[in-house]
Amino acid sequence: MKPIVVMSNMFNEIDQLPTWFEWVKKIADGGILIVDTGSDDGTIEYARAEGAIVLVDDIIRREGYGPARTHLRDMAKHHFPRAHWGVYFDADESINESEFHILRWMADYLSDEFDVIALPRIDWHDRAMTKAENDFRYAPDWQARMTRLYSDIQYIRRLHEQVVTHKKIYTDLQAPKINHFHRSAGQEKRDRIGKLCAFLHEKDELGHTYPAHKKEAEYLEKFKKEGF
C-alpha cells in the first residue's frame, strides 16, 4: 500500500473537527498534517490531541492559497518521509465512506504517468445534502487535490490555485466526490473568507488569469474598512 497524508490549512474550525477527524483517520494511513493560521478556539490543541502534526503559520494571508498548498506538500515530505501521496481537504469538506475504497485503489494502482489526481467537488447548500449548486456529472468542478509527494509539482496563484510542473492529471467521474459545505457556514465565517479572497485576488500578480467573484468588490471594500 502507498501511504496517504491528509493535509489541511485551518483557522478556528473547532466545531467541525470531531466529524472531520472521524472520517479522515480512516484514509490517512500516512499521517495528518495541518498548517493553522493562528486559531484561538481550541483547533490547534484538539488537532494535536487527535494525533495530527500542527504547524502554526499565517502563510495563506502572506502568500496565498497556491504557495500554502506547496508548503503543505513540502512539510508532509519532511514529517512523513515514507508517505507516497498527499491529499488536501478543508475542514468544511468530506468524502463519503462508500467511496473510500476508490481512493485506496487509485493510490495503490494508478499508473505512475499520473502524478496528480483531480476529484470532482459538489458545492452543497446544506449539510443534509439536499440541494447542490452544481451537478458533478455535467459540472464536476475538478479539484487537483491529490499529488505524489516525490514529484516536482508546484501550486501557483494566490487565489484559485493551479498546479504546474506536473506530468499528467487523472480525472474520472467515478473518483470520490468532495462534499463542500462552505455555503452552509455562518455569515461571519463567510464574510471573513470573502474578505480574504478579495484581498488575495488584488495582490495576486496572476490575478488577471481568473475573473473576479460577483461580490468581490463588496468584500474588498469591507476588508479596507474592517480588515480581516
Image: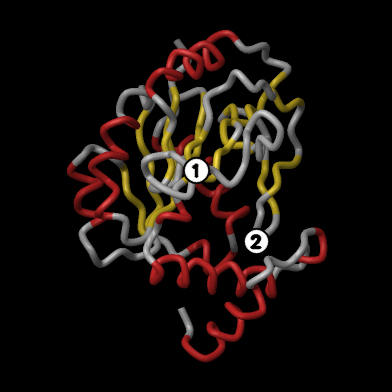
Q: Would you name the residue on which mark 1 appears?
A: 131
Residue drawn at (34%, 65%) of the image: 38
Residue drawn at (60%, 86%) of the image: 221
Describe the element under mark 1 as helix, strand or loop. loop
Q: Nearer the viewer, mark 2 or mark 1?
A: 1
Q: Is 14 left, or right, of 36 in this rendering?
A: left
Name which quarter of the figure residue 3 lies in. Answer: top left
Q: Is 188 left, or right, of 62 in this rendering?
A: left
Kindly check if marks 2 and 1 are in contact, taking CB atoms under 8 A apart as contact: no
Q: Callout 2: 10 Å neighbours few (<14), some, many (20+)?
A: many
Q: Is 102 left, or right, of 52 in this rendering?
A: right
Q: Position of residue 37 (x, y in %)?
A: 40, 63
Q: Quadrant of the N terminus?
A: top left
Q: Which kind of residue does numbered mark 2 sit on?
A: Arg
Q: Nearer the viewer, residue 200 or 152?
A: 200
Q: Which kind of residue does numbered mark 1 sit on?
A: Lys
Q: Would you name the residue on which mark 2 appears?
A: 158
Whole-angstrom CA distance, mark 2 to mark 1, is 30 Å
19 in relation to 43, above or below:
above
